Image (spheres, rainbow, N blue to C red):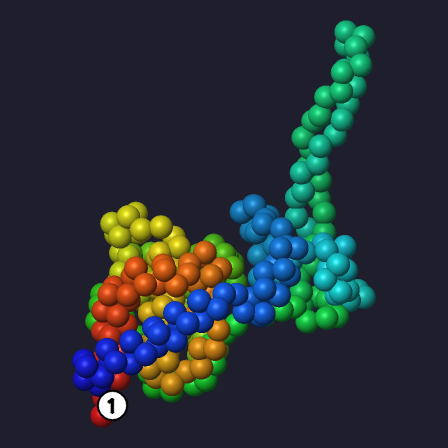
């Protein structure tokens, strides 16, 4: 694909994305955020405990929290043990006063993964759909040509490297979660490649997370649309998840266009 054609596709896709951001949160994003607000942010230690006991865990919550989400733990399911802090009040009787004091203690509690429950489906974050066909191989070739290592992680390794994310970039190295759908793999790899192209080294320190995530997701959305994938509300929802908006996008248009055009040309190099 010629440079001018790639730029035209980029401009059209960015106009569509800007319009979606102007309309605010989609119903899907609103429902997703409401559901996610019921899940705790676990400490790294508890995340490791969960991963060791159930490596394929995704959404984890206690028995009562699942009930509030209209889901119920299946009969016979074994809970995942984590450590929870608790405050204990004790009377100070050493000097005959009645002052209450609190002490921090820890106890083992049980949580359950969504796969261990039945009931109402959880709202899902919007995802890219379609088939990238041979474009993923070309994208991987471009990653390699850019001197960037690509690795895949699963189980405990994925928990350590990615947490709950599907991919991450580390400056010269990209890690993706094993087992993503073809569309998710292409979209996530493009997103992380955009981080590498735009935010490697000093760029990460100069720009806020909102700007970095807006730029990377906008590039991924543009490239995905260019090869015919269905981006629906995935990009605008993701950007708004990181507090980005139409103005954030507008401030980075030149940077996004440059990176997206380069990737589009690379993944369509054999097309007329």
Examine the rendered structure and indicate whether residue 204 appears above or below residue 85: below
Give x and y (percent) for residue 93.
79, 12
Determine the residue positioned at 35% across, 56% down.
211
Q: Nearer the viewer, residue 77 or 103?
A: 103
Q: Where residue 50 sits in the image (x, y, percent)? A: 61, 54
* Quadrant in the picture for the N terminus: bottom left
**Occupied quadrant, residue 228:** bottom left
Q: On the rendered image, what quadrant is the C terminus found in? A: bottom left
The residue nearer to you, when weighing 251 against 38, is: 251
Q: Quick check: 2 above or below 36?
A: below
Quarter where residue 100 is shown? top right
Confirm whether residue 144 shows in the render: no
Q: Nearer the viewer, residue 191 or 29?
A: 29
Give how far across and how far down residue 15 sits, in percent. 35, 74
In this rendering, is residue 230 above or below 212? below
Q: Secondary structure at mark 1?
A: loop
102 left or right of 214 in image: right
Relative horizontal placement of residue 125, taking residue 6 as reference (left or right): right
Q: Which residue is mark 1?
A: 271
- Residue neighbourhood size for the residue with mark 1, other residues' Cα within 10 Å, grouped as few (<14), some (14–19), many (≥20): few
Residue 114 shows up from this direction: yes
The residue depicted at 72 percent of the width and 51 percent of the height is 110
Which residue, as the protein is rendered here, is positioned at the far left?
Answer: 3
């Amino acid at each position: 694909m010629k440079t001018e054609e790639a730029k035209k596709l980029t401009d059209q896709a960015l106009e569509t994305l800007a319009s979606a951001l102007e309309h605010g949160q989609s119903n899907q994003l609103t429902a997703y955020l409401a559901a996610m607000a019921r899940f705790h942010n676990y400490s790294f230690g508890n995340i490791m405990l969960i991963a060791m006991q159930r490596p394929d865990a995704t959404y984890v919550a206690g028995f009562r929290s699942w009930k509030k989400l209209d889901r119920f733990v299946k009969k016979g399911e074994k809970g995942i043990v984590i450590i929870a802090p608790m405050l204990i009040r004790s009377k100070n009787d050493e000097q005959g006063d009645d002052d209450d004091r609190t002490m921090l203690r820890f106890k083992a509690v049980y949580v359950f993964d969504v796969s261990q429950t039945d009931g109402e489906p959880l709202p899902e974050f919007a995802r890219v759909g379609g088939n990238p066909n041979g474009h993923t191989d070309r994208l991987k070739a471009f990653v390699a040509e850019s001197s960037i290592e690509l690795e895949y992680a699963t189980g405990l390794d994925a928990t350590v490297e990615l947490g709950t994310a599907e991919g991450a970039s580390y400056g010269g190295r990209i890690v993706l979660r094993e087992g993503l759908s073809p569309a998710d793999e292409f979209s996530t790899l493009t997103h992380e490649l955009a981080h590498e192209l735009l935010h490697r080294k000093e760029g990460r320190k100069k720009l806020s997370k909102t700007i970095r995530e807006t730029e990377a997701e906008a590039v991924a959305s543009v490239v995905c649309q260019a090869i015919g994938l269905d981006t629906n509300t995935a990009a605008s929802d993701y950007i708004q998840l990181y507090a980005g908006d139409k103005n954030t996008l507008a401030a980075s248009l030149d940077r996004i266009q440059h990176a997206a055009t380069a990737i589009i040309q690379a993944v369509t190099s054999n097309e007329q």
